[in-house]
Amino acid sequence: MTLKSIPSLLGAVAVAGSMLMGATAMAEDKIGFVYVGPVGDHGWTYRHDLGRQAVQNELGDKVKTTFVESVKEGPDSERVIRQMAADGHKLIFTTSFGFMNPTLKVAKQFPDVKFEHATGYKRADNVSAYSARFYEGRYVVGKIVGNMTKSNVIGYIGSFPIPEVVRGINALTLAAKSVNPDIKVKVAWVSTWYDPGKEADAAKALIDQGADVILQHTDSPAPLQVAEERGVWAVGQASDMSRFAPKAQLTAIIDDWDGYYVARTKAALDGSWKSEDTWGGFNTGMVDLAPYNKAIPADLIALAEKTRNGIEDGSILPFAGPFNKQDGSVGAKDGEALDDGTLLGMNWYVEGVEGELPK
Amino acid sequence: MLLKIEKRSESSRVMVYMTPIIALVLTVLCSTVLFTLLGVSPVEALNTFFIQPLDSRYDLSELFVKATPLMLIAIGLSVGFKANVWNIGAEGQLTMGAIVGSSLFIYFHDIDSVFLLPAMILLGAIGGAAWAAIPAFLKTRFNANEILTSLMLVYVAILFLSVLVHGPWRDPDGFNFPESRTFSDSADMPILVAGTRMHFGTLLALLAVLGTWIMMAKTLVGFQIKVIGSAPTAGGYAGFSQKKIIWFTLLFGGALAGVAGLSEVAGPIDQIIPTISPGYGFTAIIVAFLGRLHPVGIFFASLLMALTYLGGETAQISLGLPVAVTGVFQGMVLFFLLASDVLVNYRFRLNIGRKAVS
């Protein structure tokens, strides 16, 4: 091949490539997913990708789902989202809090494309917001770990001190204290959603400080592996992580986006899609629990199931009073429960959590 | 040893300029194998990686948006690397520049003045330079290794940013989420081409490339840097102060990294968030070497590096290739570049059956 023939070859390739793209674009509607982590994180992104696969399986050749993984929050995410919109995607799910403002910016430029942003609080005519009430799962887990701990110290690995994470810590603490008033919750902040090394270090540090149950609001199974090695209990995050810690995992709080993603995609295809704000819990199937560890006594499982059913039918509200904040002031009075607005902006610990909330 | 590496008495001038191209060709060849193994047509994959991201005017503007911080940082670092000053901490200087520069907006967000942004850019440069001044001081006063000190200060800067953005700099209407309020129009980098994200920072990067070129080629300080870098003793005899050069190159690199940080937060990000840069300060080190520490080379190297990122995203959307492919790709470019570099300056000699005469 001579040097001269290269440009014409490249030209031919470009034409062929664009024709190929054009041909596939007409046959089916494209549904895009933007992920903050790798699809193999076994946690957050993994569960969103299962949701994507559910859409693909359910709707078959009517849709073509695409995704971009490990997208950094910041300028990169705006480019990726915009590229998907420009590429003819009909509906785009952006699945991390930090994608909120980029999603809204792109949505303004593409009014005909529908967007769904997870865990944010801003919306537009073509941007829905959705999230799950994971704290409901934490509350059930709290009843279990409060009874299972011998040292009365629970270790909690936090990612970032945002309301979502603080809410989980508080729900867990309230439930654990309700069955075991001596409980203490120690929190280690790791400033990352996914970093197996850092998460494992935090787990070791917490165990060294006496914790015999490890909870996490980060996405890798590393803390469970540490717990398995050191012979303490742990609770999986976002997906069933029992294969990483068959003995240590008590249960796991499962994010299940499948139903939501299928429903929203169907709505986008048949034209009934409207901008909505969804915050679903156990009752919508968005939150679920992995099978209980066999080591949990039957009466404890019964308590957990009772709590779960109560939350599902609304008779149990995790943030019902009376309880105090960490500083001793009243969190909620007897007979009252915190409303969604307060929960969404929660930036204080309840009594029983040790240490200071990073500000 | 069976194989001996020895320095060539003279390296070929042609080959020095050819190595980046050879490295690129080898990368393309090897990635052909990689793509075939992944079950993707190599022609289609290379098309997605290198041609599609340059398809339209908008795509080109995105290339410059991505290349801007890399260019600014790499050009600043190259000056230090020429003088054998190894500033590895540009990521921290970028973060500090973004913090100090945008502090003006955070605390005086009601100001609506044409002077706000220029003042922020200036403060960004000062912030970055100040952060680089710490390794400069430790190096010149205590002879502390600047590789270590500058690298460790990266983590300090990033954690400091985290403290601010989770605390006092949070948007008062932001539900306690770790994000500042979004920048007002007078704190935003002006957009250069309407309808795109290409901003004033790109112009600053091009000016920095041009200015550095002139400085290195035409001024006394540029000459001193080159002499100190290649022959420190000779530089000493000529009366050039090594300490001054250490100070100058670190402050220079820090200032440009600081401007890069500010142009990111006042440009495409538009607010302060917990992670300002996906590692531009470290990628820029690769860019600087890929560009042969020469301004023109760095200009093209930053565009090429940006292209591999954009191409990686396109490949994920249209071909479903995993993100790791992008990393493998960049790794191959660097590997082949450094490998051919070694072969330009050194050669291997078989050592069978004879004693080395020493």
Image: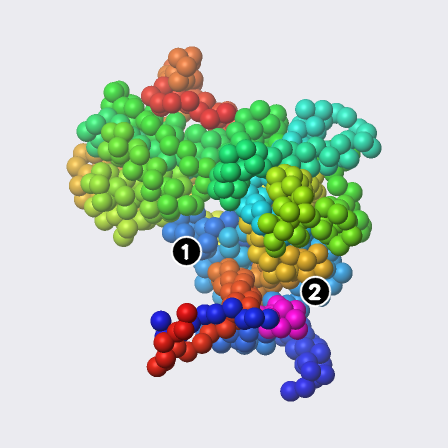
- Does the magenta run of residues contain B15? yes
User: Magenta region: which residues?
Assistant: B11-24
Picture residue at 39% right of the left edge, 18% below the top? A326
Picture residue at 73% right of the left edge, 56% below the top? B61
Q: Quadrant of the N terminus of chain B?
A: bottom left
Picture residue at 66% right of the left edge, 63% below the top? B53
The residue to which callout 2 is attached is: B54
Q: Toward the viewer: B201 or B357?
A: B357
In the rendered image, residue A120, in percent from the top left (x then y), is placed at 55, 38
Q: Would you identify the image quadrant in which residue A140 lies? A: top left
* Chain of the residue where label 2 is placed in the rendered structure: B
In the rendered image, residue A203, in percent from the top left (x then y), is placed at 31, 38
Q: Is residue B317 above or below residue A238?
A: below
Q: Secondary structure at mark 2?
A: helix
The outermost residue toward the right is: B114
Residue A279 makes an appearance in the image: no
- Local crowd size for mark 2, using a 10 Å CA cut-off: few (<14), some (14–19), many (≥20): some
Q: Toward the viewer: A261 or B314?
A: B314
Picture residue at 57% right of the left edge, 56% below the top? B286
In the rendered image, residue B125, in percent from the top left (x then y), is placed at 69, 37
* Chain of the residue where label 1 is placed in the rendered structure: A
Q: Would you identify the image quadrant in which residue B302 lies? A: bottom right
- Amino acid on which the number 1 mark rests in the picture: Gly
Q: Main secondary structure of the magenta part?
A: helix
In the displayed structure image, the side of residue B328 where residue A7 appears, left or right: right
- Does the magenta run of residues contain B306? no
Distance in Å between CA atoms under marks 1 and 2: 30 Å
Q: Residue A40 shows which numbered tag?
A: 1
Q: Secondary structure at mark 1?
A: loop
Q: Quadrant of the C terminus of chain B?
A: bottom left
